[in-house]
Amino acid sequence: MMGSDQRVVRAARVSFGRDEDTDELRDKKLIRYLFKHKHASPFEHNIIAIKSERSEWLSILDKLDNPTVQIYYAGGYMWLNLRNLINGRDVFKDIYDAIEERFPTVTGVVKKDGEIEDEELMKMRYSRDEKFLKEKIETSAGWVGLVDRLEMDTDMDYYTFIVECPLFVARQWHRHRFGSYNEISRRYTAWDIKFYIPGYLRKQAPHNKQASLDEPIGEPLNSEYLRIIRKKVEESKNIYEEMINNGVAKEIARGILPQFMMTRYYWTVPRIALDNFIRLRTHEGAQKEIREMAEAIESMVGYKGTDRKNIL
Ligand SMILES: Cc1cc2nc3c(=O)[nH]c(=O)nc-3n(C[C@H](O)[C@H](O)[C@H](O)COP(=O)(O)OP(=O)(O)OC[C@H]3O[C@@H](n4cnc5c(N)ncnc54)[C@H](O)[C@@H]3O)c2cc1C
């Protein structure tokens, strides 16, 4: 198993940029709230691998009535996340006791269908992460941290990362759909708005329309445009703050903030999709900012080539 009760809460709190803060009592109440209001995506960052025969997996699939429940089979294990387990709980009754060891608050809340009084909730056990991050690498456009890994030498080994990067890098990253994301929400919070300012402005590549050359445009244009970028970014932040102070909703005021703005998200991904990401995004055709991040990920967890199974 990978994850903890606390992991659910961290993935939920990244919405308002507070994933580093945890507190047992508030966290337990948040888990109950997430369950009752069906805010389910934070449960996806907890992964369960169950040793089983292929026939057992097929028989589970046969019993499932809910087409959203995704259960994979690789390397002699069934793989699913905690959200899938909860949605398929009728067919997974037998393994609830084992799961309870790892996620005591979540399973307690689920068993009571969320109808659990504070007093009982407070008495319940609660599991924590050993560390916030196992490893962290800074790049020129942000950082990537390894939160956790569940490695059984299969194509579906799982990894969780935290990424801080500019919006345009996140747009490219989120095209990698096989996996789970929870991201800071600029509808919720105006907290800690930061921007990426490149060290220099790269030249357009002459033949590849979407690529750049890793060399600066000539001076004085390079310095002049960088000065303008810094000024415009600062101006947009000032207008944003002024709007917030005058009662404009964050969800609409954020429109003034440029693509250089930093965002932050949790990313939980199986090895086969991670290898696909590493291969595509460490390639020289990928944008430098995401390439550096993919290289950082490769240096932390390696590339195993499992994605070569896909012909398309
Ligand atoms: C250099 C570069 C340029 C790009 N330019 C553009 C662009 O101009 N516009 C644009 O929109 N995107 C662009 N992309 C994004 C690209 O189209 C992919 O969306 C992205 O690379 C994610 O790859 P993926 O779909 O293989 O990964 P994932 O979404 O993580 O999927 C992993 C694997 O799961 C399988 N899979 C996932 N979902 C499905 C599905 N619905 N049906 C069948 N199989 C599935 C596939 O085998 C896939 O390889 C670009 C990517 C790169 C690297």
Image (tube, rainbow, N blue to C red):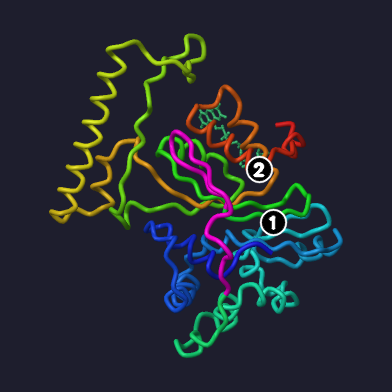
Q: Is residue 116 above or below residue 94?
A: below
Give the x, y percent position of residue 93. 71, 77
Disc 2: which residue: 273
Q: Quadrant of the C terminus?
A: top right
Instruction: Indicate the quadrant of ligand 1 in the picture.
Output: top right
Residue nearest the observer in this picture, 272 or 160: 160
| Tags 1 and 2 touching, CB below 8 Å | no
SS at badge 1: strand
- Residue at 54 percent of width and 55 percent of height: 133
Question: Over which residues does the magenta segment extend?
Answer: 127-146
- Indicate which disc, 1 or 2, sits on the residue closer to the N terminus: 1
Residue corresponding to mark 1: 150
Is residue 133 located in the magenta-colored stretch of the structure?
yes
The amino acid type found where label 1 is placed reads Leu
* Label 2 within 8 A of ligand 1 by Cβ: yes
Q: Which mark is residue 213?
A: none
Q: Nearer the viewer, residue 38 or 215?
A: 215
Q: Is residue 14 magenta?
A: no
Left/right of residue 200 with respect to residue 96 in the rendered view? left
Whether residue 54 sits left or right of residue 224 in the image: it is right
Task: Identify the residue at image location x=15%, y=48%.
Answer: 242
Q: Is 95 on the left-hand or right-hand side of 107?
A: right
Who's the residue at 66% across and 37% down the image? 276
Of residue 274 and residue 162, the one placed in the foreground of this image is 162
Image height of 246 relative to 1, above or below? above
Give the distance between the C-alpha atoms of the residues marked 1 and 2, in whole angstroms.
Answer: 14 Å
Residue 297: percent from left, percent from top: 60, 41
Closer mark to the observer between disc 1 and disc 2: 1
